[in-house]
Amino acid sequence: MRRVLTLLFFLPLTAIAAPSADYARVAAIFSKHCLDCHAQQDPEGSFVLETFAPLMKGGESGPGIVSGKSSESLLVKFLDGTSGRKGKNQFMPPGNRKRLSADEIAVVRAWIDAGAPAPAAGEENVRLANLPKIAPRGTPRSPINALAYAPKPNLLAVARHGAVELRDGSAHTLLRTLTGLRGQVNALVFSADGAHLFAAAGEPGLAGEVRQFKTADVALVRVFEGHRDAIYALALSPDGATLATGSYDQKIILWNTANGASIKVLNGHNGAVFALDFRSDGKLLASASADRTVKLWDVASGERRDTLAQSLKELYTVAFSPDGKRLLAGGVDNRIRVWAISERATETTNPLLESRFAHEGAILKLAFARDGRHLLSAANDRTVKLWDAHELKEKQLLTGQSDWPSAVSFLRDESHFAIGRLDGSLDFHDLNQPRKEN
C-alpha cells in the first residue's frame, strides 16, 4: 500500500468483447504492473517494457514478443503463468504481487496477434489520461508533509502541494512562496549555510524530482530527475557535496550537487524508501523503508554495511543523533528503536539498545534538536511528544492535534519548534509560553 499520506486514483480497464490492438492500452498496462522492475533504469533480466523499441528487442532470455503469435510469445507465457521456465510455470509480476486480469492479458494478446504495431508518432510519450477538469466543492486542503529550518538565515521551509513556503523563523510571517514543483512536496533540506533549499516531490507512478533553489532570491539552480515514482526521502551530506534521494520506486540515488549528475544507485530495499539521514561525518547513510528495515550504506562505495531488521512493520522515519553514535527509527509498529552505531557500521557491530513503545499510532516523524539533548516524535494518534533524547524519557505530551502531525522541526533552540499537519495547519510552540497557532 502506498504511504498513507498519498492519495491514489486508479482508472480500471473496461472489459470489452474484442480488445483493440492499441499500443497505448498495452503501455498503460505495463505502466500499472511492470515498470517497477522493467523500467529503463536497472531492468530485471535486461527486459525493458517502458518503451516500444527495447520491448521488441527483448532481454536476457531472448525476444519477449513473437509478432503475430501471442501464444508463442514468452512475455504472454509469463503473464498467464505458462512459461515452463526452469521446469515450472512462473508468473509476471512475481510472488504475491497482483497479477494481470484476464481482460488485461487479452489486450496484450490482441496487440501481439495484430502484429505488435508500433505507436503512432508522439503517442509513446503520452502517460496521462485525458480527463475533464472538475472543480472542487470546497477549498482544497493544502497538507504539510515536511518542514525544514535553517538557523543562519533563520528560515522555516514549509512543504505543500506543488509549493514551498519560506517563513521567518522567529516572527513566522510568510516571506515568499516557491511554486512550480511537481505534485506533493514530501521532503525538504537546507544546505548547512542556509544558502540553498532542496525540495523533493513527484507524481505517484510517474516520476520524482528534486528542485534546488537559492534562498536569497529563490532562483532555481537545477532539477534532479531519475526516479520512476514520487520521492519521499531526502538528505544532504554535511559538506553539501552529495544529495541522497529515496523513492517509492524502492531505489536510493546519490547525486553530485555541483553538477546534478547521478553518482550511484543503491539497490536493496524491497519497499518504498520513506526516510534518509547522513551521519555527521558524511561517511554513512541510513535509509528507512516500507520493507520494515533500516539499511546502512557506505557513501563512498555505495555498499550496504548492515541491515537492521528488528522492526515489525513499515518504517517512516529515521534520524542519527547529532554526534552520530546512535540511530533512531519509527513507523507503523508505534515504537522508537535506538541502535548504537559503530565507526565502520559493519554487520553485528550495531546493537539494538532500546525499543520503546512511544505512541498509540504510527510514528510519522522523528527530529533531533541540534544540541542532541531533545527529540520530537509525531504520530497519527494526533499527538506530538518531546523526549529527553539521551534517556528516551517523555518530557511533554501535546494532544488535540487537529489532524495527523505529519511534520515537526525544532527552530532556533530546543524550546521552540513547529508542527505541520495534513489539514494544512501550522503550529508554533515555545515551551515557556502558551502555544500560538497560525
Image (cartoon, rainbow, N blue to C red):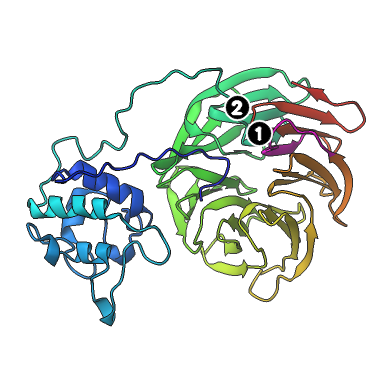
Seen from the viewer's position, the closer of residues 66 and 371 is: 66
Residue depicted at x 9% and y 61%? 69
Please report whichever mark, 1 or 2, sits nearer to the chain's N-terminal start.
1
Q: Is residue 60 left or right of residue 416?
A: left
Residue most toward the bottom?
87
Whole-number angstrom distance, CA of label 1 to CA of label 2:
7 Å
Give above or below for 62 relative to 313.
below
Q: Is residue 324 visible?
A: no
Determine the secondary structure under disc 1: loop
Q: In which quadrant will I find the C terminus?
A: top right
Residue most toward the right?
432
Give above or below for 80 relative to 15.
below
Mark 2, residues whose alpha carbon is within 10 Å: few (<14), some, or many (≥20)?
many
Residue depicted at x 40% and y 46%? 226
Give above or below for 173 relative to 143.
above
- Where does residue 37 sit, x and y in percent of width and height? 36, 58
Q: Amino acid at mark 1?
A: Gly
- Where does residue 292 sit, x and y in percent of width and height? 60, 61
Check residue 215 for magenta coloring.
no
- Where does residue 319 sit, x and y in percent of width and height? 70, 52
Seen from the viewer's position, the closer of residues 50 and 239 is: 50
Check residue 399 for magenta coloring.
yes
Determine the secondary structure under disc 2: loop
Q: Which residue is mark 1?
A: 194
Magenta stretch bounds: 398-411
Callout 1–callout 2 Cβ contact below 8 Å: yes
Residue depicted at x 48% and y 55%? 250
Q: Which residue is mark 2?
A: 215
Secondary structure predominantly adopted by residues drawn in magenta: loop
Q: Amino acid at mark 2?
A: Thr
User: On the image, which quarter does residue 62 sit in?
Assistant: bottom left
Q: Is residue 277 visible?
A: yes
